[in-house]
Amino acid sequence: MAINNPTSISPMADPRGQEMAAMTRVDDVSELGNELAAWDAVYEQLSPGVFNGSIREIWIDERLEILWEVGSQAIWTAGSNVEGMVSLGVPVASGAAGIYCGVPLDDGAVSFLPAGKEFEIYCRGRMDIVSATIGETLLAEFAAGESLQLADRIFRQPLVRQHPLQAAKLRRGLAEIVRAVHLHPELLKIDASRKAMRDCVLTLALEAFDVNAKRTSWNLHPSAKAWIVRTIREHALAHPEDQLNIGDLCRFYRISRRSLQYAFEELTGMGAVQFLRNVRLNAVRREIRRLASNPVESIAGIAARWGFWHLPRFAEYYRGLFGELPSETRKQGSQLNTPES
C-alpha cells in the first residue's frame, strides 16, 4: 500500500511489501485519502482559505488500520470503507462539531461504520478525526466468549454513540499509538509491541460497543436538519444541470424556507446558497485536476456545466474558496501529472 505523494515521510514496509506506517502532508483537499487501502472517499473543502492537511496511516497488521486525518478547513467527506472491516472514529479537536451520516457529531461522540457501507461526515471549522478500521473476524476472535453479544452490536447501518468518557478513551488510545509510531517507527518491526498495540485497539473497540450492556445507546435517528443538508447536497452533485434556487428546494422537498435556512446555518455555519455553491466549486476543481494533463475541455466549459455561467464571478468565488485561480489549479495539476525524466 503506497501513499502517492512526494511528501510522504519515512514509510515502513512489512515482509510482504505492504507499507505499515506513512505520513503525508497535502496542500490540496482533493489529494487527501489518495490510495488509502481501507477507504474510498472524496473530500470537499467548504470553508474559504488555503488548505493544509495531513494523513497519518498505520497498519498494525493486515486487518487493523489506524487513520488520523487533519485539515485546516471545514471538510465534507463521502465514501465507503472496505468489505470485511468495521470502523470506529472520534473527533480529536475539542469542541469540534459536524454531521455523521445524518446524525449531529461532537467530540463526545463515537461513530461506527459497518463493513463496506457508504458514509458522509462534515467537520465544521476544521477536520481532525482519528479512526480504527478493524477486520470483523479479528474483532470476533478477540471477543472470544463475548462474540455473540458483539454480533448483536455490529449494526448494519452507520451510527453514533454519545458517550464522552468512551470517546475520550478511544481518542487518547489511538492518538498515543500514532504519535509513538511516528517518533519510533521501529516499533512496528517488533512483534511484541505490535501485539500490544493491536490488543489496545481491540479492547477500546469492545468497550465502545459495550457488549455487556442490556440496552444499546447508539443513536438510530438522524436529525431532520441533518437529513435536509445531506439530501440537498446529494441532489446538487447528482444533477449539476438542475440549478435549483431556495424556493425550488423548498417546494421540491416540502419544507419551509425558514427550516431550510436554519438547517444549513446550524449544522454547516453557512446559508444554503453558499453551501451548495461551495459543493459545486469542489466538483469543478476535481474535474480541472482530473483533466489537467489532457485538457479536452476548457475551464469555462467545466464551470458552465456546473452552473457557473458568469466567468469573472466564478473565478472570484473559486479564488475566495481555494486561494487560487482555476488556471493555477490546472497548471499545478499538469505539473503533478508530468512523468519525471
Image (cartoon, rainbow, N blue to C red):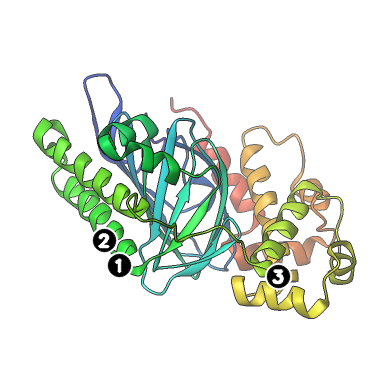
Q: Position of residue 73 (x, y in %)?
A: 49, 65
Residue receiving disc 3:
274
Residue 181's spot in the image, x, y percent? 19, 45
Q: Amino acid at mark 1?
A: Leu
- Rounded to the nearest angstrom, the CA distance separating label 1 from label 2 is 6 Å
Disc 3 residue crowd, few under 14, some 14–19, many 20+, Cα 10 Å: some
Left or right, residue 207 beside residue 31: left
With 107 as the anchor, is 196 left or right in this view? left
Please name the residue that numbered disc 1 is placed on: 165
Query: What residue is drawn where x is 70% and y is 50%?
Result: 284
Can the viewer see residue 78? Answer: no
Q: Is residue 264 above or below residue 200?
A: below
The answer to whether the residues at label 1 and label 2 have Cβ atoms under 8 Å apart is yes
Which residue is found at the position 28% from the left and 21% from the top? 17
- Residue at 55 percent across and 40 percent down: it is 117
Closer to the chain start, of discs 1 and 3, is 1
Q: Say left or right for 321 vs 72.
A: right
Residue to which mark 2 is pinned: 169
218, 67: nearer the viewer: 218
As measured in the structure, the alpha-carbon distance from the residue carrying label 2 to the one carrying label 3 is: 37 Å
Few, some or many C-alpha atoms within 10 Å of disc 2 (few <14, some 14-19, many ≥20)?
some
Q: Quadrant of the N terminus?
A: top left
Q: Amino acid at mark 3?
A: Gln
| Camera-nearest residue between 339 and 19 | 19
Q: Secondary structure at mark 2?
A: helix
Front tag of 1 and 3? 1
Dot 3: element = helix
Give the amino acid at mark 2: Lys
Could you tell me if residue 10 is visible in this image? yes
Q: CA distance from mark 1 to mark 3?
A: 36 Å
In the rendered view, would you say 255 is above or below 138?
below
